[in-house]
Image (cartoon, rainbow, N blue to C red):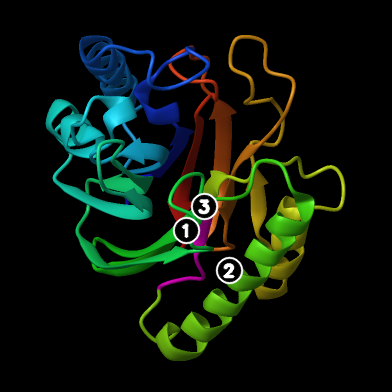
């Protein structure tokens, strides 16, 4: 089987390096999303996990960013996980999303709270890669509160534990987990806690091994990660140099164990 690639990228509502969404014209948003689409085509991942993707938000041009990216990248499969919804004049609809070259067999979105703006969550999918069912989870955790992140990790671990009981006979391997965790792995926090748990299921590896992802002009923090389970062999990863968001994307490549 050819090597597989997965990319995780917080695209910051398509606003580029503008600090606040809502001050970017729709044509500029489309131009930036077109550049993100070209980055995806150039790196050519099998699976793309995106955070801060808008479906229909006034502050982000009132158009579907995922569909725009899907059409401009040529990916056949996609799924949205909406974590924030608000109607009215200041309408919002955004969250996490996945693009895939391979069929998405199942998906479920879990929202951590009930806020209509700023809420986080995770998108769970099962993707068919050459007849193998790969579970993939795309996370976005709280950006400021360590306590909130630990509470969110508890919900993730409870979810994975229940899925493991009911779905393990269908999985080819334990989940690939990725996203914007909003903290480093070098001190006790959500990333370290997730890694501790997943290593109970075998020799998980954390990517990138080196390199920072935030803020993208002069990155000084590692906030974006990909957790690969033991079945992902001979893995390598890199932080992609990019100025299309305040985050830089992370790309991991690996071989699936036969």
Q: Which residue corresponds to mark 1?
A: 122
Q: Picture coordinates of residue 176 (x, y %)? A: 50, 58
Q: Which residue corresponds to mark 2?
A: 156
Do callouts 1 and 2 mark residues in contact (Cβ within 8 Å)? yes
Secondary structure of the residue carrying tag 1 is: strand
Q: Picture coordinates of residue 255 (x, y %)? A: 45, 50
Q: What residue do we see at 47% from left, 33% from top?
A: 10
The residue lying toward the viewer, choosing from 183 and 242, is 183
Q: Distance between the residues labelled 3 and 1?
A: 7 Å
User: What are the residue bounds of the magenta stretch?
Assistant: 172-177
Secondary structure of the residue carrying tag 2 is: helix
Secondary structure of the residue carrying tag 3 is: loop
9 left or right of 150?
Answer: left
Q: Distance between the residues labelled 1 and 2?
A: 8 Å
Q: Distance between the residues labelled 2 and 3?
A: 12 Å
Which one is earlier in the sequence, the residue at label 1 or at label 2? 1
* Residue at the outermost right position: 187
Q: Which residue corresponds to mark 3?
A: 120
């Amino acid at each position: 089987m050819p090597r597989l690639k997965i990319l995780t990228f917080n695209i910051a509502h398509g606003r580029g390096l503008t600090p606040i969404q809502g001050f970017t014209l729709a044509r500029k948003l489309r131009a930036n999303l077109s550049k993100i689409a070209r980055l995806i085509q150039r790196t050519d991942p099998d699976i793309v996990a995106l955070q801060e993707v808008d479906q229909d938000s006034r502050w982000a041009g009132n158009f579907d960013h995922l569909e725009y990216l899907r059409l401009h990248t040529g990916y056949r499969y996609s799924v949205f996980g909406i974590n924030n919804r608000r109607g009215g004049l200041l309408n919002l609809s955004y969250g996490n999303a996945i693009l895939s070259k391979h069929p998405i067999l199942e998906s479920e979105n879990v929202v951590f709270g009930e806020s209509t703006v700023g809420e986080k969550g995770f998108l769970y999918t099962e993707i068919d890669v050459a007849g193998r069912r790969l579970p993939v989870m795309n996370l976005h955790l709280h950006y400021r509160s360590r306590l909130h992140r630990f509470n969110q990790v508890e919900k993730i671990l409870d979810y994975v534990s229940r899925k493991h009981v009911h779905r393990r006979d269908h999985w080819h391997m334990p989940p690939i987990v990725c996203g914007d965790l909003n903290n480093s792995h070098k001190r006790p926090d959500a990333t370290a806690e997730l890694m501790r748990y997943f290593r109970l299921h075998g020799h998980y590896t954390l990517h990138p091994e080196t390199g920072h992802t935030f803020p993208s002009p002069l990155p000084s923090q590692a906030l974006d990660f990909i957790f690969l389970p033991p079945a992902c062999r001979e893995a390598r990863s890199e932080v992609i140099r990019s100025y299309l968001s305040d985050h830089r994307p992370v790309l991991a490549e690996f071989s699936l164990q036969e």
